[in-house]
Image: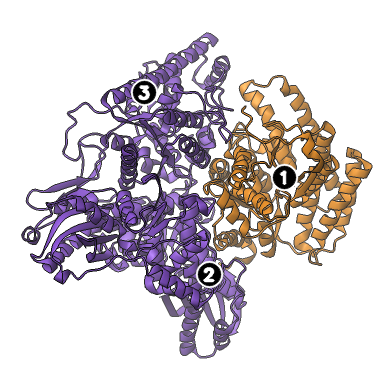
Amino acid sequence: MSYLLGIDIGSTTAKAVLLKDGEIIYEKYARHFSKVREKTAELVAEIKEIIGDTEITLAISGSAGLGLAEGISVAFTQEVFATGEVVKKLVPDACCVIELGGEDAKIIFFDGGVDERMNGSCAGGTGAFIDQMATLLNLTPDEMDVLSLEHKRIYPIASRCGVFAKTDIQPLLNQGANKADVAASIYQAVVNQTIAGLAQGRRIKGKVLFLGGPLYYCKGLRERFAKTLQLKDDEAIFPEYARFAVAMGAAIYAEKSGTRIKVGELLEKIKYTKENAVSANRLPPLFASPEEYRAFKTRHSLSTVPKRDIADYKGKAYLGIDCGSTTTKLVLISENREILYSYYSSNKGNPVEVVKDELIKIYGLTSNRVEICGCAVTGYGEELIKHAFGADAGIVETIAHYTAAKHFQPNVDFILDIGGQDIKCFRIRNGAIDSIMLNEACSSGCGSFLETFAKSMGCSIAEFAEKGIFGNNPVNLGSRCTVFMNSSVKQSQKEGAQTEDISAGLSASVVKNALYKVIRATDPNELGDKIVVQGGTFLNDAVLRSFEKELGKEVIRPDIAGLMGAFGAAIYAERFEKSKLIGIEELKSFTHEAKSTVCKGCTNQCHLTINSFGGGKKLISGNRCEKGAGGSANSKPLPNLYEFKRNYLSNLHHGDGNRGVIGLPLALGMFELLPLWNGIFTSLGFKTVVSSLSTRATYEKGQFSIPSDTVCYPAKIMHGHIEELIEKGVDCVFYPCLSYNIDEKASDNHYNCPIVAYYSELINGNMDISSRTKFLYPYLNINNKKELARELGEYLKPFGSFSKLALVSAVRNGFKEYEKFMSAVKAEGIAALERARAEGKRIMILSGRPYHIDPEINHGIDQLACSLGFVVVSEDSVCHLTTPPENVAVLNQWTYHARLYRAAKYATENSDAELVQLVSFGCGVDAITTDEVRTILEKGGKFYTQLKIDEITNLGAVKIRLRSLMSALEEKEAK
Amino acid sequence: MNKYYVEFTEEMKKDYTILAPNMLPLQLSLVANVLKSEGYNVELLENSGPQIPEIGLKYTHNDTCYPAILVIGQFMDALLSGKYDLNKVALIYFQTGGGCRASNYISLIRKALKSAGMEQIPVISFSFAGLEKHSGFKLSLSALRKIIYAVLYGDVLFLLRNQCKPYELEKGASQAMADNYCRVLEERMRKDGISFKKFKKNCQELLEAFAAIPRSKEKKVQVGIVGEIYVKFSPLGNNNLEQLLVDNGAEVTIPGLFDFFLYCVYNNIVHYKLYREGKLKYPVLKLVYNFLIKKQQEIIDLINTHGVFRAPASFAKTVTLIKDYIGQGCKMGEGWLLPAEMLELAHGGVENIVCAQPFGCLPNHICGKGMMKPIKDRNPNVNIVAIDYDASASKVNQENRIKLMLANAKKPEKSIV
């Protein structure tokens, strides 16, 4: 019998298996660093060494193999299909296969109808994701794996995609969380992603086979999978051939449908088949000529800060520290703002150590000649560093950057900062920060993304940038989230793009993302004429050039672009005369230890990190309110309408009738209509059970049955609420389908969004309720009481017959309860406004939908706002205080959303009120409302602040935004 | 309703060019010709290419649905091309209204025009729900009737072309035949007037003409396409999905546009039944519905009698198929029609289905992805793959998933175990 060869080329690795008479005589697993052709040729050459120029039969598989197979006319088989075939042959009694690859995740169910699935286009949490996270922890993937086995606890980390997870992990690291715990939590995130994104409502059980590189190498990941799926030892199978399953599948496929060819000829073909023609979707090169590049370099070399040798400087100095998400920066300046010392480096997972070492170094260099008179800290790690080392001030990043930019261009109009994982843009008007735009969680990770990408292609970020400058045909990669960019890059590689072109293309994407996604500019002139760009990412000349090209303007990039935050902080510190900064002696005995615990102050159960710095100094972080930080709630708390509504809904009377027990899930539209349904059912003689306010556990309880992983979090959490009600043994779960919400006569129509309206249909189709309890989800008309009574009578027949009179009076009663609730909210709103005005407090209209009061959905933003000194009111508590705005430029057809426009108008009419809009990730309707709310506010001379929220639990970014808003307000008032 | 929009006036009708996005080449070019014969100078946009989504992203919120980005991109690309006198051009877009954010397309188009400094351009909302009034754009009952016929003709051409194309011996013959008849039928509608009798006669001719195209007898995998209406139909929206499937050896079935029209009518009947609203309209709608259903059945019978091609499913039957799966009150976007079409395909023997939707499409969370499990549970042979389309979604990923679906579809013949 002849030789069978299977080649599997994935997004990051190439695998080959050679079979002779069913025996494996060669197998190889190697990273290809995007050099698909070269690596494949290498493997084939090795095979030629072994068997000589013999005839073989082969098939190729894998996402990056498709292009190659087509190019050299060799049989191709889809990789999931290949896996399915090989498993059926080798492990006939397998129930399920989970295979994680570089960028794909796949699942195959065998029992009860074969079902093969791959992750959707929005799900990066796989091998490449693990690599990216390891880089973040400053570990190799192997080290991370070993470490993860020692974990003691698991942190909740968003599992949708790498960017999300990063936003969760970074603060954990900055707060000093244990790396072992973080490593295990990363694996858990991958597991959750697999379950939520792939299983989609189908339970993973029975004998499960785990395949693919990551599952072969990462023991910690295996452990998380087995534990989460509750698999017994003989049910979780991690075979020796895990890495080669697809290649083996391809070899088996080759037996029947493969291509026969001599090894030598194959090798020639792989090496010399002409590259595919350059596809049309390319951009012009960044520089048309070497002269253009030289002119560019010369122009930018003018924006510099003078340096001064620290060794011979005597006098006062000011220190600025920017403890960013991935990097830590320090700048020490002289009285004349010359740079005496600067430092820029990755956090290495522990910024405290980095800063400590640097301080020791600085003290060593300055000895007694230099007096550090002031020190200011900014960035994500601001609080931690400030407390650890006794800095004089902590300032919000936006202010630090503005201060620094002013140094280069006193009349700056616009500042764009692209850092490791955030983009900050602010427009300056009349010398004050006028509007702040930060990237949303979904499109961050720009700088660090470039870096990880450079690494995956086998070069340093500097080399990568260098290559980009000279790319002849930059790839057009689109302007969306980085996960998509990953796939687009894959696509361009398939089309034969070179590293040079990809580097230049990625730079253009970063720029377009910032311009069109974050700034939302339609015309480059909107940015003004004097633009300062900064942040480490702009040190990359390819990015800088792309930006200038896209704008059609020249911009200023200071030579210290990466140090601007620290430089700004140092300038800020000039106001101090005597610094409280830790001295050299104290530094020597400085210790830092971080411990994690759960706060028992209230039901929020915040995960706290307690940092101890020796000498009894402590910093507690992770808390959502002052209680956790060791403070007390002595003074009368500021009014918070979110809290008020939560309390109101938690204290309804649930009846004691004997008609049966009705379960009402407290999610989506129920947050507003609960009093109505509760009133109706209790009047009819039912007892009601309402599910509790959500926690992370609520979500996890229901995540197994979520079919669409891109739906909003408020909808996903519904699954957990239904599970809870079923567990509580209710006779029936009730969540009606409501195409129309209550008509408040303030909009063109009164729809619910499709999710709020019909989520019950999805629940019914995916949650297997009928075997456990009744599920009642009738289509109801809640704008006609008589009709509603008729409909309810119809649908409640299984619970006995109700007289028409009883039904009508129950409906009337329900509406009375509903009106009572709405009036109470309005009255409380007015009381809150009055108190704010009496005490001179700022008012925040925290606007969203009724379900945004759920503490798991808003992650405690309402409490955070209160702790920053805002009186928090909700959109529905103030929207009646003004008239609907005229000429809303969009179709104003949803009840909840119409309130937003009115609330925005109220904010423009009251100088002490600011509107902050909460937007759930994936909310399609808010793509429409946010622009409109912004327009209303900006026309009225107000700031617009949008907070995008998801499973994410990190409040750090939110805090920066709110503090920036406060600083901007203060500056505006000072003018 | 506030009147913030530029009206399309009687005056404008005379010499304005009205641009329309081309979602469905065959059906819409017939409809456009009807509008032309009514005195509207309608031009279906043919521009495509990677700049369309780019321009769309520039002029609208990036989280808006992909169809909106494409439609706006196509409009803006045309307007910025310099080909049109910006003071003599109007835009038209078809809307059904309803709780989906798609009802906001018109507003989004206007916003885009405004930010490009072209707010003088009127945007006509072509809608049966009467969302807006434009004095220069009023369709008579007879024009509406013609439009319905145009859609019916389009659907028949679409069906025949799809059934011939994978088997044609001479590449391009089916498309050429369809394009040719598109012109011929337009001319006949204009010259001979319309009646159902003439329609049937023409259909008979179409059946024979397509049956005469030389075709191979091999058996191909049948794949159905359902989904959000724009990405389901538009090659621009779905990266030419239909061609991709044909190139991979499949025969494609796509339920026609007329079904969507019937769905809109039927929803009004359901609305009365559920909520007892619109009592006056109800009997009229029922009459219209029953009439249309009867006509559809006659077309089906005609195709079956001819015996060469597979007739489309009857809408009346489709309605019954879905009853145990999802409530018919679920009417935003494609609503219950989407899973109904999956079942319709499966019952008609087309068990491999691509469900195409824009990334993050709200109704499709429920009606598309949310219904796949119950449908698969009860129809274990159904092989559905959901594909998301987006401005930056990579073709490789889409293609790979489609290949997986096809690999499973072809399994019985090529099983190697």
Instruction: Please indicate whether residue B415 sits to the left or right of residue A638 in the image.
Output: right
Tell me what hue chain B is rendered in: orange
Chain identity of mark 2 = A
Q: Which residue is mark 2?
A: A474
Q: Would residue A111 be visible to someone looking at this image?
A: no
Count of numbered marks: 3
Query: Residue A666, image x and y in percent?
Result: 40, 30
Q: Nearer the viewer, mark 1 or mark 2?
A: 1
Tell me what hue chain A is rendered in: purple
Marks 1 and 2, how far apart at CA? 38 Å
Q: Which residue is mark 3?
A: A829
Q: Amino acid at mark 3?
A: Gly
Query: Residue A829, image x and y in percent?
Result: 36, 23
Q: Amino acid at mark 1?
A: Asn
Q: Of helix, strand and loop, which one carries label 1?
A: loop
Q: Which residue is mark 1?
A: B87
Chain identity of mark 3 = A
Quadrant housing residue B236: bottom right
Q: Would residue B133 be visible to someone looking at this image?
A: yes
The residue lying toward the viewer, choosing from B236 and A23, is B236
Which sits earlier in the primary sequence, circle 3 or circle 2?
2
The residue lying toward the viewer, choosing from A79 and A892, is A892
